[in-house]
Amino acid sequence: MAKKLDPLLHNELRLSILSLLISLEHADFGYLLEKTEASKGNLSVQLTKLKEVGYIEITKTFKNNYPYTECKVCPKGIEAFEKYVNEISKLLNLKK
Amino acid sequence: MKPTNLTEQESLQIIQQMVDKAKGNVGDDAIFYLLWGWLVLIASILHFTLNYLGNPHFWAVWPVLMTAGGIASGIIGARKAKKQPTKGYIDKLMGYLWGGFVITLFIVLIQARLIGWNYAYAIMISLYGLATFISGGVLNFKPLIYGGITAWILSIISFYVPMNWVVLLVGLSMITSYLIPGYLLKNKYHG
């Protein structure tokens, strides 16, 4: 089953991140941390992986003198997400 | 990269949960419905009462209360934007919708003498209805959709009643389109 699915998205945390970002124009690191309930380290690693393949864009700036990380989904990420949703829908239909 | 052993159901569940979580701040908009609902309701009752009592300055309640509402909305909106770590597409759409609503409202207000004040109020009730109806559809919140429809019905009635009664219909439209849905929205997300 997993062969057909994008291994980058077929992971609980990465799928959670992309599902959140797909519904939002952008989100900061703290927000993603709160909603995914992941650890800072793990979230950071998974965000980097998604960035490396061009699924998301990460902008690091400063807000009130504190580092501020903003994440945004890229067109490639939207395409991958839609494909992933289509694939799991197909697999679910096959099982019915 | 090793895929984890997620089943299709689990994947769908994660997507559903996260999309729901991203909708979380929608209930914060209730404050605007309540603020404007109360302000316009109070303004319309004061207008009706002062006019009934023969006070020539009855119209002054509008610029005073609406300016206060504009300042309060600006402060609340700015604070909300500062606190909010995200910006959703719904927030963006609502911003443009209500921004466009205010501009159209001003155009009607500026031309009210040409249109005639009672017709201008009737058009304004219709505009409240339109913005509330679209908001209800976008937020998938039926009380706002019904509130919008009620405002349209009140707007049609407004075209056929004397001016002072139109003002009371504006107040009534605030109860049905802003206050009732506003409190229901607040309870749904913060209850």
Image: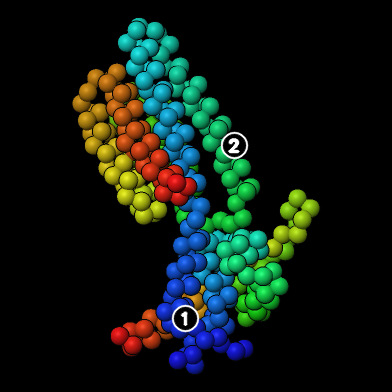
Image quadrant assignment for residue B166 = top left
Placement of B94 over or under B57, stated as above or below: below
Q: Quadrant of the N terminus of chain A?
A: bottom left
- B62, B13: nearer the viewer: B13
Q: Is residue B36 left or right of residue B141?
A: right
Give the colour scheme of this rendering: rainbow
- A38, B179: nearer the viewer: A38
Residue type for callout 1: Tyr
Image quadrant assignment for residue B165 = top left
- The disc at residue A84 is 1
Q: Is residue A85 visible?
A: no
Q: Quadrant of the C terminus of chain A?
A: bottom left
Label 1 secondary element:
helix
Q: Is residue B136 left or right of residue A58?
A: left
Residue at 51% x, 79% y: name it: A80
Residue at 48% x, 72% y: name it: B14
| C-alpha separation, residue under disc 2 versus residue under disc 1 | 42 Å
- B77, B161: nearer the viewer: B77
Residue A44 x %, y %: 69, 72
Residue topped by disc 2: B75
| Image mark 1: chain | A
Residue at 45% x, 46% y: name it: B191
Residue type for callout 2: Ile
Residue A62 x %, y %: 75, 57
Residue at 45% x, 50% y: name it: B189
Residue B75 x %, y %: 59, 37
Dot 1: within a 10 Å radius of its alpha carbon, few (fewer than 14), some, or many (20 or more) residues?
Answer: many
Placement of B49 over or under A51, stated as above or below: above
Residue B169 x %, y %: 29, 27
Label 2 secondary element:
helix
